[in-house]
Amino acid sequence: MLKSMTVSNFKAFEKPVTIDFGATGNYEFNSDAIKNNIVKTAVMYGKNASGKSTLALAIFDIVANLTDNFVNPRNYDIYQNASHLQEPVEFEFHFVFNGVEIVYKYQKINIITIVSETLQIKDRIVINYNKLKDDPSLYIDMKGAENLQVDINMMQISALKLVKNNCVLDNNEENNAFMAMCSFVNKMLLFWSLDNKDFVGYSSAPGVNIVEKIVQNGHFEDLQAFFKEAGFTDELVHNSGTGREQLYIKYGNTLLDFNSAGSTGMRSLLLVYFWLEDILKPEKCPSFICIDEFDAFYHFELSYFIIDKLKSYDCQVLLTTHNTSIFTNDLLRPDCYYICSKDKIVNAHNATEKEIREGHNLEKLYRGGTFGL
């Protein structure tokens, strides 16, 4: 799991900011939102232009390093903070897999160009180099990677990716933790709301026909059930008479085009289902899901439904929102709600000296400034 991530000089973040999923409290309710003392299901708040979307992109920058999955470079056109355009962006990720802690630090000058990397497993540095130094030698100390020959000056991709793709690593605790991290990053998924349909990670193929994929996978009946569970009772049908699968809403003998007749909330829910249709299959379940402004088109009851669904899945989740009605202990707990600014990211549990109990109204406390940064 991802325990924490720190970034500095990236977009809106000039100084280092950290989101710490390991900063949990001793709450006895909603324990299914926590796994191995790490927040599994998190919701993040922040004012407009506070850095929520910037943080999401920062977390998913690692996808470009370690995988071949889709990363739209347009999302990273503006990379460095405007105050330090000539300096690299610095990232630091902390992961924990089977009790083994991994620290991965790197610097980049754009989404593609890595200038330094350090990989530390159980307090031991196993990969290290820095092209910004006079002697940018590459250090690799992993069992099974001894014969890897690399010219640091010619290396255009991550050293970690080189090791993963070109070495048969020994079966030991360090290497297994490294491969677990690579697998985790390969299954990370970020997507946005309906009007964007953009995403980062998980898949290498953008532009997939959503309805066609759902039908081909045999999940159309499950889609119907998902919509009904969410409170939409209209019958859905699909038809390929136009040469490609299209979705319709059935009213008696009349079929209405889903994109034209469906509400914005229904269309947004279809996108959520599309990304989550295989989530119950362990081999296809994303490791970390981030949905930016996940409920921009939802009534609060539908927001509740989505969070409850995501909380029940075996994956780490981060949702950003402006909807304070879901800032409640009925859904999660204080250490699962994060407040974001350009200077600091902290969960509600650690944002106040007040002792928060299950019966407290978190929304009222938030609106009243109890969790002010």
Image (cartoon, rainbow, N blue to C red):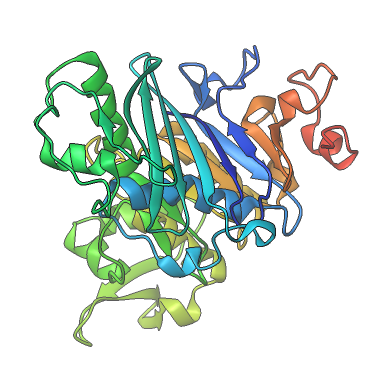
Point out residue 265 in the picture as x, y percentages from the top left corner: 55, 64
> Viewer-proximal residue, 199 or 358?
199
Point out residue 325 in the picture as x, y percentages from the top left corner: 73, 45
- The answer to whether residue 276 of the structure is visible from this angle is no
Point out residue 173 in the picture as x, y percentages from the top left corner: 23, 14
Measuring 49% from the left and 51% from the top, which residue is drawn there?
230
In the rendered image of this protein, does residue 209 appear above or below residue 355? below
Furthest toward the right, the residue is 368
Measuring 36% from the left and 39% from the top, which residue is drawn there?
135
In the rendered image of this protein, does residue 120 appear above or below residue 191? above
Measuring 27% from the left and 55% from the top, which residue is drawn there?
156
Measuring 38% from the left and 46% from the top, which residue is drawn there?
131
> Viewer-proximal residue, 294 or 326?
294
How many marks do you count on the picture? Answer: 0
Place residue 39 in its image quadrant.
top right
Q: Quadrant of the N terminus?
A: top left
> Viewer-proximal residue, 325 or 164?
164
Furthest toward the bottom, the residue is 242
Q: Quadrant of the C terminus?
A: top right
Position of 46 with respect to 80 (left or right) is right
- The answer to whether residue 345 of the structure is visible from this angle is yes
Furthest toward the front, the residue is 134
Place residue 259 in its image quadrant.
bottom left
In the rendered image of this protein, does residue 56 appear above or below residue 360? below
Position of 286 with respect to 172 (left or right) is right
In the rendered image of this protein, does residue 188 appear above or below residue 175? below
Point out residue 126 in the picture as x, y percentages from the top left corner: 30, 24
Position of 164 with respect to 116 (left or right) is left
> Viewer-proximal residue, 361 or 158?
158
